[in-house]
Amino acid sequence: MAVLGAVAFMAQLDFFVVNVALDGIGRSFPGVSVASVSWVLSAYAIVFAAVLVPAGRIADHWGRRKVLLSGVGVFTLTSAVAAAAPSLGVLVAARAVQAVGAAMIVPSSLGLLYPSFPKRQHTLVVGLWAGVGAVAASAGPPLGGLLVTLDWRWIFLINVPIGIATLIAGALLLPEVRQPKGAALPGPVSALALLLAVSLLVLATVQGPGWGWADIRTVALFAAAALAAAATVERTLHAKAPVIERQLFAGREFTAATVALFLFSAGFAIVLLSTALFMQEVWHFSPLHAGVSIAPAPLASIAFAMNAGPLQIRFGRTAPAVTGTLAMTLAAGYWLMAVHTTPDYWGGMFPGLILVGLAGGLAQAPLFAAAGTLAPERATTGSAVLNMSRQIGSAVGVALLVALTPQATAAGFDHAWSVQGGAGIAAAAALLALRSRHTP
């Protein structure tokens, strides 16, 4: 549990921890534009989202332990390269390859949980694993704010000893699990169509605020993504060995979790970035001050995530997930009423951060646990689909925040928090509308 939780935490943390370091990175490479520096974040987001499902399918065929440890090796090595990057181009390239390693780690780690523990403990361990992801997302800004006071390179360098330790422990402790011999690898056309659909969609979403949503480049990327998505769906329905098997969506619970994760993640990404940006740009907090101020959210996430398993056993998966998604909406509503341009952390920002911690700790564990409703040989691919949904949702949330706060004004953040609230309501509605008849 410690090994699988540690590698999942490391891989997911790096999507959020870089946000508060972009200014410092830009100062280290004089003459580069803000748009160029943003690729340190965008390259990771695009590649991570695009490679998740193919990596999950490969893990099922070649061995989940083998792919996970290979991913940890790639992630650790490229973290060292990123920490020592002599130029922005090297840093962006390292981040892209680092994302490949992360995409190999995340679905494989969840796929290894099920065979590593007896069935009676599945709800508990998956709840802990998903809680780790919630804490990683919430801890990104405060941890990044702390490390960037030393040097932004520490954000990547800290991965190296953790990666080496988990490689050794994983080689000693983790079992090997793969599909039976003779199972067909996913077809290349299906895999390529999915890669193009996800990467083009995330690229268009990331670049849209800068280029303009009506710009011909943005429109062309969305159109190409739609064509690739149509090809992916066609392969899913008719190919003998598609990269995403249609049997994954035969159950309503997995379908509901996939949709809800996309919506929740869009709102949660707005939460994580808007709070840090608001405190720095409107209240003029330092990066360290803003990072420490956000810390109550991951602490609250830990408290609720530790109880995710017992809560699911008592109330089922739907009730905690709906409560979590609506807690994110309540946080947005509170900030709209209580947060103003005059700094008031304890009365304004703090109560909403506790609600955000509740949201992350309660919602994500039961949503990711939906992979456990699938056949054992599809658990890794199911985990990859859920993570892909989360990553695309996060990219959409970041893009919406950028589009709504071009001048970092209080009014812009109000609009972003309104979208955050709507995302929570939509996620809860999807869960209630698509929930399984057998799940409370």
Image (spheres, rainbow, N blue to C red):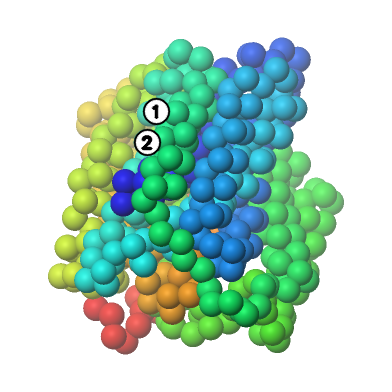
In which quarter of the view is residue 129 placed?
bottom left
Residue type at the position of mark 2: Ala
In the rendered view, tell whether residue 127 sits above or below residue 178. above
In which quarter of the view is residue 95 placed?
top right
* Residue marked by disc 1: 143
Say which residue appears at 73% left-offset and 55% top-offset: 200
Check contact, mark 2 vs mark 1: CB within 8 A.
Answer: yes
- Tally of numbered tags: 2
Tag of residue 135: none
Question: Is residue 259 in view from this perspective?
Answer: no
Query: In terms of secondary structure, where does tag 1 sit?
Result: helix
Nearer the observer, 87 or 402:
87
Where residue 89 appears, x then y in whole percent?
A: 75, 27
* Residue marked by disc 2: 139
Residue type at the position of mark 1: Leu
Nearer the observer, 98 or 29:
98
How far apart are the two marked residues, 2 and 1, measured between alpha carbons?
6 Å
In the rendered view, tell whether residue 389 sits above or below residue 434. above
Question: Is residue 40 in view from this perspective?
Answer: yes
